[in-house]
Amino acid sequence: MNEYKAEQIRNIVLVGHSSSGKTSLAEALLFNTGAVTRLGKVDDNTSISDFDPEEQRRKISINTSLIPCEWNGYKINVLDTPGYVDFVGEVKSALRVADCAIVVVDAVSGVEVGTELVWQYAEELKLPRLILINKLDRENADYDRVLAQLRERFGKMVVSLQIPIGKETSFKGEVNVVNRKAFLGHEAGESAGPGDLTARLEEERGKLMEVAAESDDKLIEKFLGGEELTDDEMRAGLKAGLRAGTLAPVLCGSATQNVGIPYILKFIADYAPSPAEAPVATAQNPATRQEEKLAVKEGGSLAAFVFKTMADPFVGKLTYFRVYAGALESDSRVVNSRDGHEERIGQLYVMRGKEQLPIKKLSAGDIGAVAKLQETATGDTLCDKGHPLVLPKVAYPNPVYSVALMPKTKTDLDKMGAALQRLVEEDPTLRVYREHDTNETIMSGMGESHVDVAVRRLKQKFGVELLTGVPKLPYKETITKVTQVQGRHKKQTGGRGQFGDTWIRFEPLPRGAGFEFAEEVFGGAVPHSFIPAVEKGMREIITKGVLAGYPTVDFRAVLYDGSYHPVDSSEIAFKLAAHKAFKAGIPQAGPVLLEPIMNVTVTVPDQFMGDVLGDLNTKRARVQGMDQKGVWSIVTAQAPLAEMQRYATDLRSMTQGRGYFTMEFSHYDTVPSHIATQIIEKARKERAGEEAEEEEE
């Protein structure tokens, strides 16, 4: 692989709904640039992009693959992303380092939920985008219908740059709206367009001319004056409109039949922005706290953003990065600006699927990888030692689907911690944590498939087999009224006895206050040396509440009186006295069960709004507000976690996969009494079962 300057590089991300043909397009681009000699197929597991065993098993992309192509003196870095909504983290990472997006749309299915989502993500980043209506050779493929859908969803910025020649199985090429020339089959040569498309061609040409003219003041003046734009003026307007995000040209093709793909390469080279023409990236200098604009040139200070990490059991860790400024060379040293740690850069690679092509240097604007970095993780910035820089991180959505993990064998338990850590390094949308209240290891992800793939990957990559289950809910207990009790521990068994006597007042505190201990002892009724023992005893016992064994929170225990024995009193006696006070006092203080309440934001197309609201009502949700954003309806609500644990699956089935939601913890609130009774009863039975097992042992 040759080295390229920024002006010769194009960083293109392929996005779209699952099975729209992104991987087949990447394969066709490789084939047309001579990087491979045969067109690989997803169904045969022969594509360069889908090399992961799990991708081959499921016949879908799970990871973003880097597929560089060399064409006519240009290097096109193609980022092939997953279309399935569970793997949104991979899509967001790839969009972050691309300069232009190709939104791939299935000519049969049309605009789908994945199309709308990736459009929204690209919009947030102000990323130029073109649309490819793919699979035009399929039965029921309809270019005009899909074009109308795209215009309805995304407005008049959607303009047709090509018109297909032939329908379904007779689809054989396309006519260019600007120069009216036809491209047929795999040939890159041009010929005159068919006469029967003339009227349609002029109609689309008029629409393109209007939108292209709007990108430039001089062109709009000429257009409004009733003059036609020349071909060159239309091309200039097209280029400016694409880069400004005011125009999204539509191309047509069939990736598996390799029809229309040669023109896509030409379009990318002629119209897509190079890193030198893309908006200037801004980094913060942590030493000066100042923002710095990064010049895309080799001589400047280094700034390379890590957008992906892959854990490989054989190679070790592979770190994917984009160089935003300066240049990165093999066998050099750089600094990770997050913690100032120096990293040794070994051999640099240009990745093509899983193939590693060694390269000496990667200049500003280019994308590559390096193996075996020690401390660097996804989202970090690599820079020069004397000039620290931090590039903004990718904003990933919060996980919405959780499972409890249990090792299958003792060996799996021993290897589980390290393997999970490496898995989370690889995927920033996965979270693994220990829930102390339930003593479970929890893995959270973007959906059932996401978590399932992660668990399978643990077995395949690291040899760790885990079982999954629905997580226990971290309920808590609290009190609702003030009470005061005596907790007295007295034991006389010959020799020195044990004596501790406490009077404790229990008071409820506001939600989220935790536990407080105070003392109001006068006249040495309880010596100062024993007061810490009372507090320690109380902190020990509150972890097992009186209702269902859940931690007791949001209350104050005030030691206000007591008595002691000069010989028999000890720290242990006062600890046990505190235990007795808790067990006697809390049942009198109106104990209630608390459950976690989540802030939920549900985004669905308008037609599903009624179903979603009805379903949320059955889930004890309190709707906080409703909003409209284009064709999307957004519901904000608060709902108990108990009802939302499997909502990702429910919402998908309810909205034909078109709805999505985010969820984060808000606060704890009282469980309604009829539900609390069931939870308490279940907990008592579980405890009785555990005690019976212990007795048998």
Image (cartoon, rainbow, N blue to C red):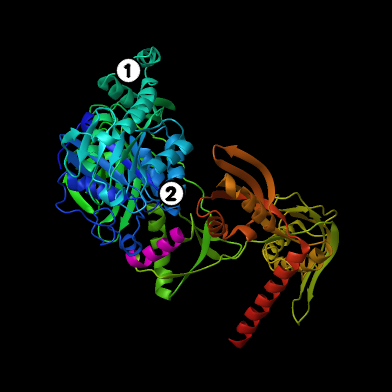
Could you say which disc has been placed on residue 88 in the image?
2
Q: CA distance from mark 2 to mark 1?
A: 43 Å
Residue 140 versus residue 96: which sits nearer the camera?
140
Identify the secondary structure beneath mark 2.
helix
Q: Quadrant of residue 581?
A: bottom right
| Residue 470 location (% of width, % of height) | 55, 66
For the N terminus, the image quarter is top left
| Residue 98 location (% of width, % of height) | 33, 38
Q: Quadrant of residue 464?
A: bottom left
Q: Residue furthest front?
A: 196
> Who comes first in sequence, dot 2 or dot 1?
2
Residue 220 is left or right of residue 175, and the answer is right
| Residue 316 location (% of width, % of height) | 28, 56
| Amino acid type, mark 2 | Val
Binning the other alpha carbons within 10 Å of mark 2 as few (below 14), some (14 to 19) or many (20 upward) gives many
Q: Which residue is mark 1?
A: 228
Query: Is residue 347 part of the magenta span, yes or no?
Result: no
